[in-house]
Amino acid sequence: MAHPLRPSVVIEQVAPGLHRLGHGPVNLYVVQDGDRVGLVDAGLPATRPAVVELLDRLGHAPGDVEAIAVTHAHFDHLGFARWMQEEHGVPVLVHPDDGHLAAHPYSYRPRHNRFAFAGRHPGGWPHLAAMTSLGALRVRPPLRTTPMLPGALASFPQGPRVIATPGHTDGHTVLHFPGASAVVTGDALVTLDPYTGRRGPRVVASGATKDPEVAVRSLEAIAATGAEVVLPGHGLPWYDGAAAAADRAAEAGVA
């Protein structure tokens, strides 16, 4: 594992037109569609230079980004969205049920107190330290958000399907890209839980999830996509299918 105060950056193409940028334990995705480009999630503030570099590699500038589709409005997914909005006028798309959280990203209340939970799970400490070093405590909320409703998102590159997957937050969504046979799952299904350090498909621990029981039920919606590739908000991509990932996550339960 990289030193928590010097988290490494990983950039890789994970499906047709989909590129993962992993910075420490946090992922975001750049979506290409011909000469169009968009972002799914906005990581943490310190990730901004790496995103600008990746966009440049792909022949784009930050102002070319059509929108940032936010899977949910936790601080580690809003990261540099405010900068993209202020400097380049990029819309920030959020499910309405996470609208208040987007405006107040530190206001969320998980099932169990996250500080007490973290104290009982030292396996998560290196990941939480890495997130802190990337600016987890200094995320500015977007100036405004645009409602992202379930259904086809024709205004976004590759036209993903937005699927409601509440539980981790009230307005959590996943984005299914049928043409790429991939689903970006945010924190509805991860392969690294940064709050415990546990790996493999799972639901994020109760120290960061509002309603774990609802989150487990939302795994069914992920499985129903039939996607071959699962792209989580934390951890490595899963290439053995959404149904298998959802089954594994349900079996793992919630810490």
Image (cartoon, helix red, strand yellow):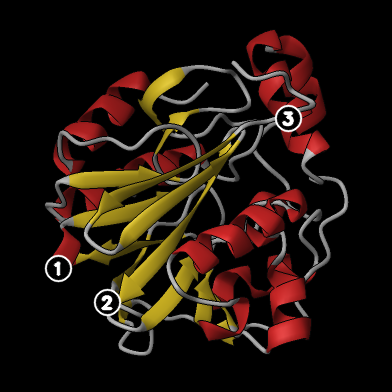
Quadrant assignment for the N terminus: top right
Taking the image as shown, residue 27 lies to the left or right of residue 13, namely: right
* Residue that badge 1 annotates: 179
* Mark positioned earlier in the residue sequence (2 or 1): 2
Taking the image as shown, residue 120 lies to the left or right of residue 159, namely: right
* Mark positioned earlier in the residue sequence (3 or 1): 3
How far separated are the C-alphas under marks 2 and 1? 7 Å
Q: Is mark 2 in CB contact (under 8 Å) with mark 1? A: yes
What residue sits 72% from the left and 22% below the top? 117
What residue sits 15% from the left and 53% below the top? 224
Residue 116 at x, y percent in the picture: 80, 22
Residue 126 at x, y percent in the picture: 71, 18
* Residue that badge 3 annotates: 130
Could you say whether the residue bearing mark 3 is in a helix, strand or loop? helix
**Residue 40 visible in the current orientation:** no
What residue sits 38% from the left and 55% below the top? 19
* Residue that badge 2 annotates: 158
Could you say whether the residue bearing mark 1 is in a helix, strand or loop? helix
251 w.r.t. 32: above or below:
above
Of all residues, the one furthest to the right in this rendering is 138
Residue 58 at x, y percent in the picture: 43, 67
* Mark positioned earlier in the residue sequence (3 or 2): 3
Q: Amino acid at mark 3?
A: Ala
12 w.r.t. 82: above or below:
above
What residue sits 53% from the left and 21% below the top? 255
